Amino acid sequence: MSNSRSAINDITPYIYGTTKLGDEAISHEERIKIARAAMNSGVWFHTARMYGNALEVLGEVFAEEPAKVPKLIIKIGWENIGQLRGVIEENIKPLGLSGVQLGQLCLGGELAKDFANGGDCYRVFQDLKDEGLVQGYVVEAFPWTSEPPLKALRAGYTEGIIDGFIFYLNPLQRFASNELWNEIVERDQPIIAMRTVSGGPVHSLRDVPGFAWKDYLQKRAVEVAPIFERSTIKSWTEFCVRFAHSFPQVKATVGSTSHVENLNEFLSAKENIEPLPASICKEIEALHHKWSNELDMLAEPWTM
């Protein structure tokens, strides 16, 4: 793999999220079917070892048509630099690959501290790139993990080694802290937006009991649904894809599905993307800022 060009520059505007490929409540045949359809579309994939046997499903599909294997983002980390190589190898072995395009850095424990302070992790990141295991990195952010990347970004440690940032960014969620978000925008850092449709259609999130996996999403859907309706856009998927791409820093949005018809909605929405009107984006941005202060930054880790 050549490291002369940042892999993020070649990313597709929609990335297929593979969470559902590890869901054993879905038949193996159906998971193979959706993986093939996504692969045949030519989009990038996002995957991780913690998604059940998603890697094995992907490995099976990749082996069928090696020429169509997509470019990939994999989750890597976790608590110290000694884990990085093993985590990458744990991901790429079932895929039958020698390396991937982007590693999503999930920072915890000593690794997060080392990252924030410009430590030895940056040398290891470069070593892994030089070996071709990854071509680049994007840093994951949640409300409870935003401080280390914020500190590193402000200090300039990320320059030349980190290609961008990846976090939930959709009409109901913006999981970088307000401070990290402002810094990313001011410094024009590339963003990959995860969880494209916020977990489902906004009217279902608002009106169907139990549809939202957490109560806060239902409450946020109450606030966002009128904005969506005023937009006159018929498809929630289109609205969400356009919302993410309304920010110039956003290079792609990651959405997961196990249904071919939903995949086709994502694929349709990525064609000829037009940003949403600025007034709509400003309304939602104001909600994001408010929600971050009221709930996100106060939440216990992984409760959202």
Image: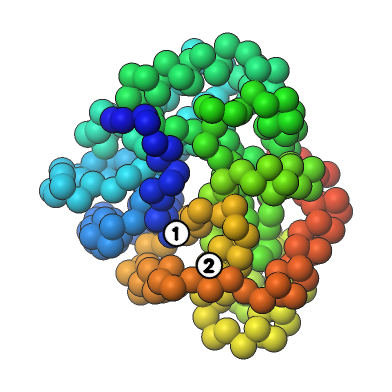
> Where does the image place residue 103, in percent across and percent down from the top left?
45, 34
Residue 192 appearing in the image:
yes
Identify the mark nearer the N-term, 1 or 2.
Answer: 1
Three-letter amino acid code at disc 1?
Pro
Specify the label residue 95 is tagged with.
none
Picture quarter containing residue 283? bottom right
Mark 1 element type = loop
Residue sitting nearer the eye, 63 or 161:
161
- Name the quarter where the N terminus is drawn: top left
Q: Pointers 1 and 2 in contact (CB under 8 A)?
A: yes
Q: Is residue 246 rendered to the left or right of residue 48?
A: right
In this view, the residue farthest toward the front is 4
> Where does the image place residue 56, in percent across and percent down from the top left?
27, 41
Which residue is drawn at the image coordinates 72% and 25% (left, top)? Answer: 155
274 w.r.t. 66: above or below: below
> Where does the image place residue 265, in percent across and percent down from the top left?
41, 73
Picture quarter containing residue 275? bottom right
Q: Of circles 1 and 2, which is in front?
A: 1
Specify the label residue 13 is tagged with.
1
> Where does the image place residue 133, in percent across and percent down from the top left?
34, 25
Q: Is residue 140 rendered to the left or right of residue 66?
A: right
Three-letter amino acid code at disc 2?
Val
Q: Is residue 153 rendered to the left or right of residue 82?
A: right
